[in-house]
Amino acid sequence: SQQGEEDPQALSIQEGENATMNCSYKTSINNLQWYRQNSGRGLVHLILIRSNEREKHSGRLRVTLDTSKKSSSLLITASRAADTASYFCATEVTGTYKYIFGTGTRLKVLA
Amino acid sequence: DTAVSQTPKYLVTQMGNDKSIKCEQNLGHDTMYWYKQDSKKFLKIMFSYNNKELIINETVPNRFSPKSPDKAHLNLHINSLELGDSAVYFCASSPSLRDSSEQYFGPGTRLTVT
């Protein structure tokens, strides 16, 4: 498996429901970030969580990080059609200045 | 004002040609990156520069040569293009190399090699 694997690969929900996507990684990290990519566009930074943090909130986003399990989850509450996009986790590998992106979760929110 | 811009947005060319993609950021960032996103949306880092100095060269064929004339620009030149080079190439920048720096991405350049 690759550093930064996400599941599910695709997720389809109704507007107003919550969406949860997960990211697993292999190495020691400085931080983990989540990005959103709308179709045909560049990635947009959503939220960053440092390796010594366990949970972080930003608006309708909640991110958790479990370094013992090398995993993170992104929860989007009260989803909207505009949340339809691909979501990627990115880990900054300790000591490398390198970010490794996950395989992405394609989220579709149905109006 | 565009933060990270790339030109061209689309590039269609034949195998064996040489092409360049330009990237500019007006954010005053020290660090810039090139990523390749393949048809399965997998995003992989290619290069990073910090204040014009090469920091990461991630097992990229020698046909790819980045150039950073100043810290606001990072261009990517590709020689002898191959079919497998077809992908979307993203430029990104971040304030610095220190950890916990978010990256700002350009809109991408879709390269199609025929």
Image (spheres, rainbow, N blue to C red):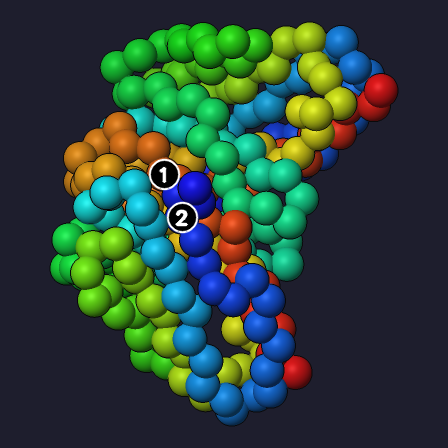
- In this view, the residue in front, A100 or A35, is A35
Give the alpha-carbon distance from disc 1 to disc 2, as whole Å: 10 Å
Q: In the image, residue B107 lies at what x, y percent?
A: 52, 50
Check chain identity for marks 1 and 2: say if they share one: yes
Q: In the image, residue A23 lies at what x, y percent?
A: 51, 29
Q: In the image, residue B21 lies at what x, y percent?
A: 43, 69
Chain of the residue that carries numbered disc 1 in the rendered image: B
- In this view, the residue in front, A13 or B101, is B101
Residue bearing the label numbered 1 = B103
For the point 49% across and 35% down, which residue is it?
Answer: A44
Which comes before the other along the chain, label 1 or label 2? 2
- Give the residue at the far bottom of this rendering: B16
Q: Residue A84 carries which label?
A: none
SS under mark 2: strand
- Image-based side of B112 in relation to B95, left or right: right
- Give the residue at the far right of this rendering: A111
Q: At label 1, which amino acid type do we have?
A: Gln
Q: Residues within 10 Å of mark 2 (few under 14, many from 20)?
A: many
| Relative vertical location of residue B93 with respect to residue A52 in this rendering, above or below | below
For the point 39% across and 66% down, which residue is it?
Answer: B22
Chain of the residue that carries numbered disc 2 in the rendered image: B
| Relative vertical location of residue B73 with respect to residue B60 in this rendering, above or below | above
Q: Quadrant of residue B10?
A: bottom right
Q: Quadrant of residue B1?
A: top left
Q: In which quarter of the image is residue B97?
A: top left
SS under mark 1: loop
For the point 40% across and 9% down, which residue is it?
Answer: A55
Q: Residue B4 carries which label?
A: 2
- Image-based side of A82 in relation to A32, left or right: right
- In this view, the residue in front, B69 or A45, is B69
- Give the residue at the far front of this rendering: B1
